[in-house]
Image (cartoon, grey):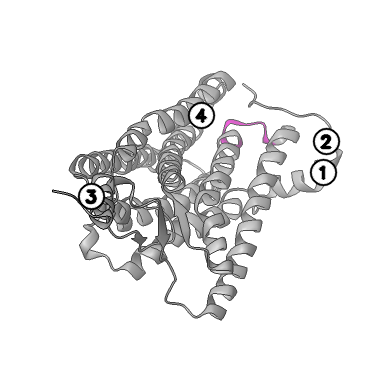
Amino acid sequence: MLLSQQDVLKLGMGAGNETAVAEFILEGFSGLDQRLQLFLSLILLLMYLTTLTGNTMIIFLVCVDHRLQTPMYFFISNLAFLEIWFTSSTTIKLLVILSSGRRTISLKSCFAQSYFYVALGFTEFALLVVMSFDRYVAICQPLHYAAIMKGQLCTHLVVAAWVLGFTLLSYRLVLLSKLTFCGPNKIHHFFCDSSPLFKLSCSDTTLLWKADSIFISFVVLGSLCLIMVSYMCIFHCILHMPSASGRRKAFATCSSHLTALAIVCGSCIVLYARPSEGVSLETNTIVALLNTVLYPFLNPFIYSLRNKTVKLALEEALGRPKVWLFPRS
C-alpha cells in the first residue's frame, strides 16, 4: 500500500516526537498589563544592580581590609559570591521577559537554569551550616576559636560546600537530558523550576520526582537540624554568660544569620516541602521571587553593611593596597 506525502510527514513526527518541543515558553507574570510588566522590570533591575553592587562590595572589602580577615567574613564573602550567581540564574531571564516579552527558552538553557538553581541552592544551605558551626565555636569555645577555625579549615569547608553542591546535583542533568517533551511547551513560572518542568514531559518522571523529593528533603531538613543543634548550644552558652553586654553582643552576632536562615528555609519549605497541588501558582511565584530576588538583595544589608567595622572598612577601602585571598589563621 502506497502512503501519501501527508501520511509520511505524520509518521515522521510520531517517530521523532521526542524532539517536537525545541523550546519552552515561560508564562510567569503573563497576566499582568504590559505597563505593569515594564514597571516591575524597572524595580527588579534596580534590585538586581543593587544586589550585584552590594555583594561585590562585601567581597572587595573582605579582600582588602585586614580587620575583615576573619573566618566569619570569609564565609560571608563566599555567600555574597554565591548570591550574585544565584540571583543571576533567574533574574536576567525574568528581566528579558518583562521588558521585551521574549518568553522562549531553549531546552538546553532550561535544563542548565534548573541545574544551577538547585545546585547553588544546595551550596547555600551547606554554607549556612558552616556559618552556624563558626558561630558555635566563636561563642561557645572562644579560647579555642583561633586554633580551631584556621584558614586551611575554612578554605576546606567552603570548597567542600561548592564541590558537593555541584557534583551531587549532576544526576539532575543526566536524568533531565533523557526526558522527552512532545506536548505543551508552556511553563507556568518565570524560570525552569522542577515541578512545572517535569509536568510537561511525556516521559516517565517518577524517578526524577522521587530523587528530587528525597534530595531536597534531606538537604533542607538535614541543614535545618544541624543549624538548630548549633544554635541550641549557642543559646545555652549565651544564657550562661555573666555580663549582660556580652549576651547582647552574642545575640546581635547571631541575629543576621537567623534572619537569613528564616527567609531561605521558609521559602524552600513553602515551595518544595508542601504538595504542589496545595500551592497556587500566584503563591509559588511570589515565594520564588522572595527566594531568588529579595533575599540576595537583602543579603549585604543583613550581614555586613549595617556593621560598624564594615562601614569603617568601606570608608578606608580605597587606601588599602594589600589584598588577602584567604582568612588569617
Q: Nearer the viewer, mark 4 or mark 1?
A: 4
For residue 285, above or below residue 223: below
Badge 1 amino acid:
Glu
Q: Secondary structure at mark 4?
A: helix
Residue at image position (45%, 61%) is 290
Q: CA distance from mark 4 to mark 1?
A: 28 Å
Start-end of magenta stretch? 68-73
Q: CA distance from mark 4 to mark 3?
A: 53 Å
Badge 4 amino acid:
Val
Please give the residue where the numbered disc 1 appears in the rendered image: 316
Q: Residue 60, percent across and down?
A: 71, 40
Residue at image position (64%, 25%) is 326
Q: Secondary structure at mark 3?
A: helix
Image quarter of residue 325 = top right
**Which image quarter is the C terminus in?**
top right
Please give the residue where the numbered disc 3 appears in the rendered image: 11
Please give the residue where the numbered disc 4 appears in the rendered image: 158
Of labels 3 and 1, earlier in sequence is 3
Q: Residue furthest left?
A: 1
Badge 2 amino acid:
Arg
Badge 3 amino acid:
Leu
State if disc 2 and disc 1 touch (CB < 8 Å): yes
Q: Nearer the viewer, mark 3 or mark 2?
A: 3
Q: Which mark is residue 320?
A: 2
